Every structure is written in C-alpha cells, then in structure tokens.
Image: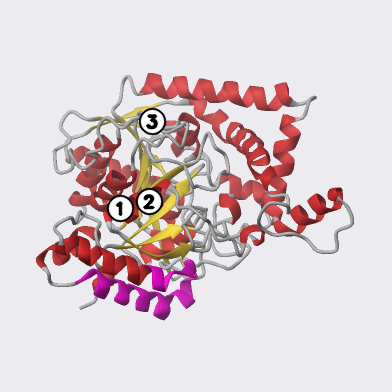
C-alpha cells in the first residue's frame, strides 16, 4: 500500500489500529524522496538516520499508550528553523554547513508529539523571495507543473507536501511565504496570528512579521498541526499566552450567520481574471454553505506593499548584521584587515537579493531618511491595522485571492525584483496586521499544457483560527 498519498488523519487511524508502524511509514517516505525528489528539489537535507530514530521512538510512544494525532507522522521542516545536529542552511552559502546546537521551539513541540522529521526543505535565501529561485543551493520545481516555480519562500515545504514526499510540512511566513506557495502548489497553508507559534529557533528575517505555520493536504490536518506547535514560550518575547488552542473545535459546523467580506481592492487591476473568477466561485460555495457574502472596501491596503518592504528591509538589515564571518558561518579567505573581512564575507556569502534588501534597509534607517521612510511606513502600518479592525467589526472573515496570478515559469521574473514583489500584494497586509490567514485550493488555471493550482485566502481578526478553519473546511467539504 502507498501510504505517502494519505493525509494525517488517514495515517493516524492506520497507526492507531496497528495496521502500520511509524518505522514502515518513515521507510516508505524516505524511499519516495529518493525516487522523486531529483525531479522536484524540495529537500536540501534528508535526515535518514535521525528520522529512523524518531520513528522507533514514536512506535514506543504508541506501545506505551502515549500517542497523539501526530505520533509517527512523517513531516518536513523549512531550512530556516533550527534542528539540533541537522544542517540548517537558510538556503544560503553563509550557513551552508551550519549545524545548530539546539532545537527551535517548534522542533521541540513536534518531537514531543512524536512526529518524524524526514529532512529540511529548500527556500529563498533567508526567506527573502517569492519563488524559491533565490536559493543559493538548488532549484525547486512545482510538482503540479515542473517548469514552474513552487512559490516562496517556503517553496520546498509546499512542494514536498504536493509531491507526497511528506504528510505535512512546516514553513515560515513573513509576507506570504506559507500562503503563496500553498496556493501555487495546491495545498493548504496557514499563517497564524503573530505570537501564536514561538519564533525561538527561527532564523530571523523581519522579527515583527515572521511567523511559523503548517502546510498540509487538508484543512483538518492543518488545524491538528497548529494545535501541536502553538504554545506560549518565554524564550520568545513576542510569544502570546494561549487561551484556547482547540483549532479543530468548529470544523464540521455550518456557516449559517457567518458574514464574509470581499474587499474590492483585492479584485482590481493586476489580478489575473481567472484567479478572480475562481475566488468568486469559492465565495458562491461558501454562500451555499450558509455564509453571508458581501462586497466591502479596504482602501488602506494600498499602503501595504511599500510599507512592508520598507519595514522588512529595515529589520533584515539589523537581523543579518550578525553574519560577519567571525562567530559562525561562511568566512571569506585572503583577508588582510577587519573591514575587508566584513566586506568580502558578506559580499561572497549573501546572494544578490539578500544584499539588495540589506542595502535598502540600511538606507531607510539612515539619519537623513528615517522619518521619510521608516517612520512613515510605521504610520501606514498603524492605519492598516485600524482599517482591518474596523472591517472586522462588520465581518467575521474576509475572502481574497492569495496571489494575483498562478505560478509562473522558472526564470520568468527572476531578473525583475519589482514584478516579483508585486506578487505579494494580496498577502503582505495580513503580516502588517499580525492577523491569521489561510490558503485553500480552489481550482486550476490552464497555461499551455500545464494545470496551475490557485488558492483563495480567508483572513480573520487575531486569534480567529478556529473560525477560519470552520469556513475553510466547509468549502473543502462542498467541493469534494
């Protein structure tokens, strides 16, 4: 039997019944990676020995009666999340051979749950990008159409789930880096409320935006993974107390009375007409399930993209200052003085996109430009947060596209950073507001012989994950 095509709920049931062991699942998953990942390039590192140890431990947990929903389930981890003793590269030459000496909080949580980590997935270098083409180490291809990008920056995680090379994967989302690749690859991806999942052990890109979340094959699976990884962690100063982590509680309940808004600004210029049509069709499905759908407006969203790039680049320039060639990571050779050490190490160790964002960040933080750019971007962020708050006084959720287009061909936009950035226009407002949002597959767009997946985005107010899962699961059920 091919277990790799099954979702978490199906695998968990088989494990519970004793029809299969975690060891057998892990062996088959590792073989699947060996057989297929040469085509897709989802994984940077396969942790075979560690995976088999974790599988044996999971089987012992089950035998002792301590198993949970994720015990024995094989998963993949994005390569900017620390895994003790397992290479963590951030897809950068700067950290190509770095072995962390500690686990991230999310790694600890999944180990405690008995999940089995198969390996680390490819990404845009230091999570800076929207196609995974900025990886310094390899190219990742979209399993739905191998000539096309998988999205980014969590492209490897999305591709691994779509290619059945794991049952679920963990990604990080700074401006859409879980939701956009989930949409491009046809899987479910959740960016939780900021502070829901600890950032301890996540290599920082933009600390006030970064959030870890799950990519899965179904909505119910996604809720189960988020339940496992969410917690309050004192090691992360932005981690929030968790009052209710039963995110599955509303799945299966009807949507009668739920009000969902369609902000008109998300359906205007630049949105592929077939993408807009698929999202509106999803709105019709949600209406059939009992939800009240209304057109609405969110004018402040026009500030989102410029504000996001100013603030993210500023935070990145600070966070990446630690990579100096002295303490850890890549160190350039032929150095004559300290200034040359910094200059050569960072020029050779960072890729073009990372260097570009560091330079932009330093510029907007410089003495003569701080008020004109950084301060103004923070003010725009506040306006957007207030606008979301006002809109959520009228609506339970908002429904939008995840990305303005489906996936594009590898190399098609690589030389145009501005066009690549515009692909984030539907996702970055969520990160500016610290809000939860999910990407759910809603159809495909035809491009030549390729069938390209498209997802819709459900956005909710802070801590509304259960309600988002309720609506997402109702849609999923209606189309199956």
Please tell me how many numbered marks the rendered image carries. Answer: 3
Q: Quadrant of residue 197?
A: top left
Where in the figure is residue 252, as x and y percent of width and height? 14, 43
Span shown in magenta? 21-50
The reply to whether dot 1 and dot 2 touch (C-beta < 8 Å) is yes
Instruction: Report whether 335 appears left or right of 31.
Output: right
Q: Which color scheme does this rendered protein use?
A: secondary structure
Q: Earlier in the sequence, mark 3 or mark 2?
A: 2
Q: Residue furthest right?
A: 336
* Local secondary structure at mark 3: loop
| Residue situated in front as seen by the camera: 298 or 100 | 100
Instruction: Report whether 343 appears left or right of 45.
Output: right
User: What residue is pinned by disc 3?
Assistant: 240
User: What residue is pinned by disc 2?
Assistant: 108
At 35% from the left edge and 56% from the top edge, which residue is drawn?
Answer: 187
What is the C-alpha distance between the residues marked 3 and 2? Answer: 18 Å
Q: The N terminus is located in which quarter?
A: bottom left
Q: Earlier in the sequence, mark 3 or mark 1?
A: 1
At 40% from the left edge and 80% from the top edge, which residue is drawn?
Answer: 35
Q: The C terminus is located in which quarter?
A: bottom left
């Amino acid at each position: 039997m091919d277990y790799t095509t099954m979702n978490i709920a199906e695998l968990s049931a088989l494990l519970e019944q004793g029809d299969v062991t975690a060891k057998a699942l892990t062996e088959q998953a590792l073989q699947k990676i060996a057989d297929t990942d040469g085509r897709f390039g989802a994984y940077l590192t396969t942790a075979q020995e560690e995976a088999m140890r974790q599988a044996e431990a999971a089987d012992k947990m089950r035998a002792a009666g301590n198993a949970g929903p994720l015990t024995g389930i094989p998963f993949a981890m994005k390569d900017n999340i620390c895994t003790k003793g397992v290479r963590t590269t951030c897809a950068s030459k700067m950290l190509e051979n770095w072995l962390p000496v500690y686990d991230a909080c999310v790694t600890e949580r999944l180990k405690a749950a008995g999940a089995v980590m198969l390996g680390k997935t490819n990404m845009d270098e230091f999570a800076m990008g929207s196609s995974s083409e900025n990886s310094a180490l390899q190219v990742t291809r979209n399993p739905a159409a191998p000539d096309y990008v998988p999205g980014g920056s969590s492209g490897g995680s999305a591709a691994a789930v779509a290619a059945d090379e794991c049952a679920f994967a963990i990604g990080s989302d700074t401006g859409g880096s879980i939701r956009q690749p989930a949409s491009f690859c046809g899987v479910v991806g959740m960016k939780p409320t900021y502070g829901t999942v600890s950032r301890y052990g996540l290599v920082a890109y933009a600390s006030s935006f970064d959030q870890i979340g799950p990519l899965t094959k179904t909505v119910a699976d996604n809720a189960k993974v988020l339940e496992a990884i969410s917690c309050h962690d004192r090691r992360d100063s932005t981690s929030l107390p968790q009052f209710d982590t039963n995110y599955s509680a509303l799945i299966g309940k009807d949507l009668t009375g739920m009000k969902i808004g369609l902000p008109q600004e998300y359906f205007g210029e630049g949105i592929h007409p077939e993408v807009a049509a698929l999202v509106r069709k999803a709105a019709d499905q949600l209406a059939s399930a009992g939800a009240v759908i209304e057109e609405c407006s969110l004018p402040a969203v026009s500030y989102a993209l410029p504000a996001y790039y100013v603030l993210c680049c500023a935070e990145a320039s600070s966070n990446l200052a630690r990579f100096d060639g002295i303490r850890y990571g890549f160190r350039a050779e032929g150095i004559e003085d300290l200034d040359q050490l910094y200059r050569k190490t960072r020029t050779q160790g960072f890729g073009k996109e990372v260097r570009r964002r560091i330079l932009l960040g330093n510029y907007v933080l410089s003495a003569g430009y701080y008020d004109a750019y950084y301060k103004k971007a923070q003010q725009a962020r506040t306006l957007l947060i207030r606008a979301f708050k006002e809109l959520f006084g009228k609506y339970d959720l908002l429904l939008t596209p995840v990305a303005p287009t489906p996936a594009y061909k590898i190399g098609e936009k690589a030389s145009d950073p501005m066009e690549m950035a515009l692909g984030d226009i539907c996702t970055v407002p969520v990160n500016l507001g610290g809000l939860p949002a999910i990407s759910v597959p809603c159809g495909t767009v035809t491009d030549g012989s390729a069938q390209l997946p498209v997802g819709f985005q459900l956005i909710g107010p802070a801590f509304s994950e259960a309600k988002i899962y309720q609506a997402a699961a109702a849609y999923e059920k209606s189309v199956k």
